[in-house]
Image (cartoon, grey):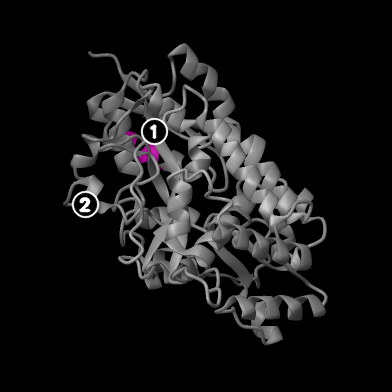
Amino acid sequence: DDPERVVEVAIFEGGYGIGWHKKMAEQFNAENASRGIRVELWGDPRTAEIIKPRLLRGNPPDLILDERLPLWLLIASDKLAPFTDALKVPAPGGDRPWGELFDQGMLDMFKSGDDIYALPAAYGAWVVWYDAKLFRDRGWTPPKTWAEFLTLSDTIKAAGIAPWTLQGKYPYFYGWNTYVAMVQRVGGLAAINRINALDPQAFSHPDAVEAARLLQELATKHLQRGAMAMTHTESQLQFVQGNAAMIFCGLWLENEMKNTTPPDFEMRAFTLPAIEGAKGNPRLFHGQGMEYLFVPRDGKNHDIAFEFARYLVSPKAAPDMGRSIGVISPLEGATPRDSVSKAQQSALDIIDASQGLFNVRVYMLFPAWRTQVMGAAIAELLRGEITPEEFGRKMDAGIAVALADPDVVVPPFQPYDPAALGETP
């Protein structure tokens, strides 16, 4: 008999855990036992640290889910195998090529030329979470405009509750994503395009500075005291315990906090409000793929790695993924409404009502800038230690330094079309 082919899969053990992924591996193994292949799946919160030396030694796992690794550096070094051919094959439960099933924008982040080098296992969206029961009991309603948002924040503060909290210990992620959403609301997709195109004045542009000013004003007046020192779970615990009325976060929040959320807590989402007189279409939202899968070139089983990725991210698996871990599939319309909680249904409402999504790639292109420059600048902005203008200059100067690195590779950029997405110049 031929020896069994063991395919190693490594999953970052974050907000979604790895229980569902292990279940999928067991199902895949049962369905493919006769083929002499077996997926061995493991996970750890420190997956990136464990895998980095293995990537350097040339003996990595066959399939990895961990977007904290420097994927663009790996792409530029030809260390990742593209999904190009795998995307031409139908996924389980689908009758069209896998690549045609993904929702708008889901395959943009790690596209270089015509090739996709990493693809998402989850739909990501940046939203404002609140407790619908608290709002109902107090007579509060989700705001539609920025003026309403500030008025609501004043009202909440007067009631003795912090209007909002933040995962302040990780500003390079949570503060950054909130800022990006603000940039679009103020300056429209033109401002997002400037950042994606690495315009040397992208962050010093008046629209980006105004977004920084509004975010700073919100933070210095309405942020929960001590939030800038809190981890993600600490601040999120403050939210579900009712000590803060709102929190900016991604769609994984409910699953990450399921063990500490009171049973009568009605977690719901609304999108960032429109800013009066600004350029951004409020029916767009900050979203992108999340939980990225990729296949190292030095892996031994590319074919099965791609096949298992297609098994995980498929129309067949999507309903159970929604029921089990509250994940909305990156495949268009693949997550049935009744397969997710009311909290995730409120996120689906945002997605269904939207005219499209936007995101930026600069924080993925330059990991050193993200941790050394951007994170510190966002934290200083939120604490009121620098002006919005100084923030913009720091961000632009950091990008200039990153671009001066002779080893950096910047892939082609496809700008958003403002007119096609409901914005006028």
Query: Is 242 located above or below residue 17 in the figure?
Result: below
Which stretch is magenta?
24-29
- Going by the numbered disc 2, the residue's amino acid type is Gly
Whether pointer 1 and pointer 2 mark residues with C-beta atoms closer than 8 Å, the reply is no
**Residue of label 1:** 294
Q: Secondary structure at mark 1?
A: strand
Query: Is 399 located above or below residue 35 in the figure?
Result: below
Residue at 49 percent of width and 66 percent of height? 341
> Could you tell which of marks 1 and 2 lies nearer the N-terminus?
2
Residue at 31 percent of width and 22 percent of height? 301
Closer to us: 403 or 414: 403
Residue at 53 percent of width and 41 percent of height? 363
Q: Which mark is residue 323?
A: none
Residue 49 at what x, y percent from top left?
A: 59, 26
Asked whether residue 276 is in view, the answer is yes
Crowdedness near tag 2: few (<14), some (14–19) or many (≥20) residues, C-alpha within 10 Å: some
Q: Quarter holding the C terminus?
A: bottom left
**Residue of label 2:** 94
Residue at 30 percent of width and 41 percent of height? 310
Closer to us: 376 or 312: 376
Mark 1 or 2: the one toward you: 1
Residue 172 at what x, y percent from top left?
A: 63, 45
Q: Find residue 103 and report its image quarter.
A: bottom left
Classified by dominant secondary structure, the portion drawn in magenta counts as helix
Q: Quarter holding the N terminus?
A: top left
Residue 386 at what x, y percent from top left?
A: 75, 51
Per the model, the C-alpha gap separating discs 1 and 2 is 21 Å
